[in-house]
Image (tube, helix red, strand yellow):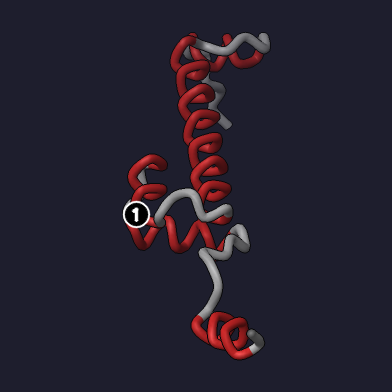
Amino acid sequence: MKRSTSKRSILNLTGVLTTIEQAELRSKAVHEWRLAKTLKMIQEGHWTIRRAASVAGLNYHEILDKMAENGVDSGPTLKELRETLDSR
């Protein structure tokens, strides 16, 4: 097995993050925060799915996938609306 002695691997072995790694971590954290915020805003009915997708840097279909993965409901179904109206 060949050992890598690049500067990056040596820095990683010492537990020090390179500037590039720090930037990647910050970028990932910001992306995750934006996604969480947009999903919350959708679920609370404050934002449309399209607006949330734009803020999160995703397209419409990607945000729908993220909503499904995270169990985010975008509002009542037609059936639920009918039931509400019928119960009045």
Residue 62 at x, y = what percent? 39, 57
* Residue name at image x 53 percent, y 50 percent: 39
Residue 67 at x, y = what percent? 52, 60
Helix, strand or loop at disc 1? helix
* Residue name at image x 52 percent, y 47 percent: 41
Left or right: where 44 falls relative to 62: right
The 10 Å Cα crowd at callout 1, few under 14, some 14 to 19, many 20 or more, is some
Residue 52 at x, y = what percent? 41, 48
Of 13 and 41, nearer the camera is 41
Left or right: where 17 falls relative to 58: right
Q: Work out which residue is located at the far front of the displayed protein and give it.
A: 88
Amino acid, disc 1? Arg
Above or below, 56 relative to 29 = below
Q: Work out which residue is located at the far bottom of the displayed protein and give it.
A: 86
Residue 16, quarter of the rendered image: top right
Of 62 and 75, nearer the camera is 75
Which quarter shows the N terminus?
Answer: top right
* Residue name at image x 53 percent, y 24 percent: 25
Left or right: where 59 falls relative to 84: left
Q: Which residue is mark 1?
A: 50
Above or below, 49 relative to 84 = above
Above or below, 6 relative to 30 = above
